[in-house]
Amino acid sequence: MQKPTIPKGMRDFGPIEMARRNYIFNTIKDVYAIYGFSQIETPTMENMNTLMGKYGEEGDRLLFRVLNSGDFFKGVSDEELIGRNTVLFSNKACEKGLRYDLTVPFARYVVNHFNELSMPFRRYQIQPVWRADRPQKGRYREFYQCDADIIGSDSLINEVELIQIIDDVFCRLGINVKIHLNNRKILAGMAEVAGEQDRIVDITVAIDKLEKIGLENVKKELREKGFSENTIQTLEPLITLDGSNNEKLERLGTLLQNSEIGQKGIEETRYILDRLDVVNIKNEILVDLSLARGLSYYTGAILEVKAKDVAMGSITGGGRYDNLTGIFGMQGLSGVGISFGADRIYDVMQELNLFPEEQLKNTQLMFVNFGEDETKFLLPVIAQIRKAGIRTELYPEPAKMKKQMAHADSLNIPFVALVGSEELEHKKINIKNMKTGEQNLLSVEEVITLIGI
Amino acid sequence: MQKPTIPKGMRDFGPIEMARRNYIFNTIKDVYAIYGFSQIETPTMENMNTLMGKYGEEGDRLLFRVLNSGDFFKGVSDEELIGRNTVLFSNKACEKGLRYDLTVPFARYVVNHFNELSMPFRRYQIQPVWRADRPQKGRYREFYQCDADIIGSDSLINEVELIQIIDDVFCRLGINVKIHLNNRKILAGMAEVAGEQDRIVDITVAIDKLEKIGLENVKKELREKGFSENTIQTLEPLITLDGSNNEKLERLGTLLQNSEIGQKGIEETRYILDRLDVVNIKNEILVDLSLARGLSYYTGAILEVKAKDVAMGSITGGGRYDNLTGIFGMQGLSGVGISFGADRIYDVMQELNLFPEEQLKNTQLMFVNFGEDETKFLLPVIAQIRKAGIRTELYPEPAKMKKQMAHADSLNIPFVALVGSEELEHKKINIKNMKTGEQNLLSVEEVITLIGI
């Protein structure tokens, strides 16, 4: 019989990985809850017409489709079958597909449940999503997203609070990060003063490359892309903009003085930074004009987070969008959201050795099994220790001591209890600290005190 | 534009449902961890050859199949297409399907990761599963299973511990339950002494019906099913068996004295009950010979849990199986497991009003927004309160008081803080208890003490 395999790009998570993943998820959940966000969950499958056309052509292609139950050939003619048009066939034979992200299902949720919701609605959602992408290092076909959004409010306090959340989560996880902040309106303003409204991306790419290739090469590239000398001259002070956040915004104010939208973007960014000053966040926040993610939907603040002590892409992102539910015909609901990249955060923590082993909730105490008499004595003792909240197991069989100790070792169980006939007689427990090798003869209460904390 | 819908048999879970579901899941997780179980997760999709043939013909039909990416027509001839054989086509066009339960993926996991695992392996897994069943009240196409299994150990201590877990979980949830215990070997023994080895189900149905229709009607039905008078006479004392668990086992010992397997089943059951006596479980345990679930895979103990105070089917089940990984060619791994039915537990708790509202982790304190000056003052105050672990939100806009209070009301937020110009001047917070209407002027520290606990 052939060994079974799992689909490519998907993963099993064993006990240690799960403990670490849970540590990340629980930290994020705790912080979301502290900031007043409520959790929701949506179904794994959505109707295809909910998903199609929401992620561009590429996205449509990457959706996993679920074959209809029953006669999925119904409604497909013989000619169409022989035509072997995969798009046409799958549109008819698959009514359902797997969730591609959490944003579209959230928009759908808001439209479906609008009457039950009090706006502004602060929701978080932590669930897997699926993409039929080519799997490669760090890119999977099934992965979790951890989103929080506030919808139904234009207030910039929401942006402030989301950045506080980011700061709080990474403080708790022990990751030093730099929070990059930009604003779609500033980008629009720059494109406007340059007279190149449709070329925001080219402009941000130029800004991004300055450090790597130098001003002359950046200008050369802009020329090659067809920007006029005049435009390049206008862009130069924007590309070379540096200094503190305040200095940048000050200078931008002058450079974009003729762009109303640009001024609005500067004002929004000032407000956010000003309020963040008051709450004293621990991580660095950086106005970064090269940041240009989600240009097809973000309309205000754009943000992205990078770990400082390890080379890794963005580990969190987010921004303001003006019309979340417009795709489903409900206009005028503005929102702002963030999404933590759990897989990359995992990799960062692994690389920097940040997982606190003692908080990963594995078994704390294993009782060696010496036989039936000892077991009968131990069962209520173990019940009492568990009642005190100590994660405890009894080796289920009176196997050889060596085998039982090896089991405790391989599970990294910090304490092993030995209760043989002698200990039984004195109703004491011989506790061995597996790290130090130290052994102590203790009462049940003393065991609870020792391990409990 | 048409309002979007979700696939039938699937559900959105809003904030209140999620809080309640999390309460159930977290309780189960906590107890599993206390008993030394480790969590694993497997991918949503498995290869179809992992799933097919594992759940009977009915199960194969109820699997959700995922259409291959790329050219799924490849390998299907024109003739086969025109033939419109859905089974043949889906076998070729769908390599992947959605998880149908957690047991088969667990067996697959054990085979794939055997070398990393130290036996006995105590794993729990809480994930959704999918079945293309006809949706009806209480039956969904996507639902969570909450499984715990111990594999690689024949010891009956495992059965004892799983029953302790059941007892512990339902104590914590506040549900009074009756734990029904049977043993496949006792059932086999009854069938053996009756000379009807293949008719275990008919015999258990007869036992089950005794109370409802009386002995004479049970015997009549057995006659109609072709049982001989002689056999019925042999079965009668088994069908009418009553008394305490010990009395039942005592009497069974005599009735099944000629069945070796029956005696083994009695001995196992005695052992389990005897050890449970020592740990003093809180809920009732009942030897129930009519219990006959999972006859195609259970080989030893069989158990099922019913709520005492509400009419509902089984809310938890489990049993011993001898060959979990045999389906994947790895022989000789015995295991025993249980599975909590989260949806039914939810319904029971709802009906009995058992959800402790204060533990559902929704927002505890909302600050009313009076404007920019107040907000700027409040941001660090709120940060301090959140740091103390109090789930706090600030209404993001200076909307009308009535609107803000209605928001707090609709979210069931127990405390609202009012900091207007006067409070601002004295650096005090006016806290309103939303249940009693009581208001108090407090310092930040006093607020934390009041709400924090």
Image (tube, coloured by chain):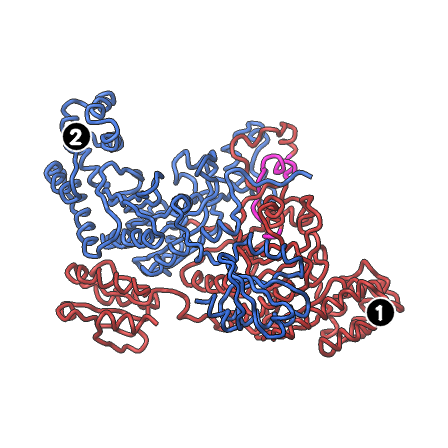
Chain colours: A red, B blue
Specify the quadrant of the image occupied by residue A171: bottom right
Protein chain holding label 1: A
* Residue on which disc 1 sits: A257
Does B248 appear above or below A375?
A: above
* Residue on which disc 2 sits: B235
Residue interval drawn in magenta: A84-103
Q: Is residue A409 magenta?
A: no
Please say whether residue A28 is visible from this viewpoint.
no
Q: Is residue A177 left or right of residue A323?
A: left
Q: Is residue B375 left or right of residue B343?
A: right
Q: Tell which of B155 and A132 is nearer to you.
A: B155
Please say whether residue B224 is visible from this viewpoint.
yes
Protein chain holding label 2: B
Number of marks in picture: 2
Q: Tell which of B181 and B364 is nearer to you.
A: B364
Q: Amino acid at mark 1?
A: Gln
Does A122 appear above or below A51?
A: below
Badge number at residue B24: none
Q: Residue at x 71, y 50 (%)?
A: A332
Q: Position of residue A119 (x, y in %)?
A: 62, 53
Q: Position of residue B425 (x, y in %)?
A: 63, 74
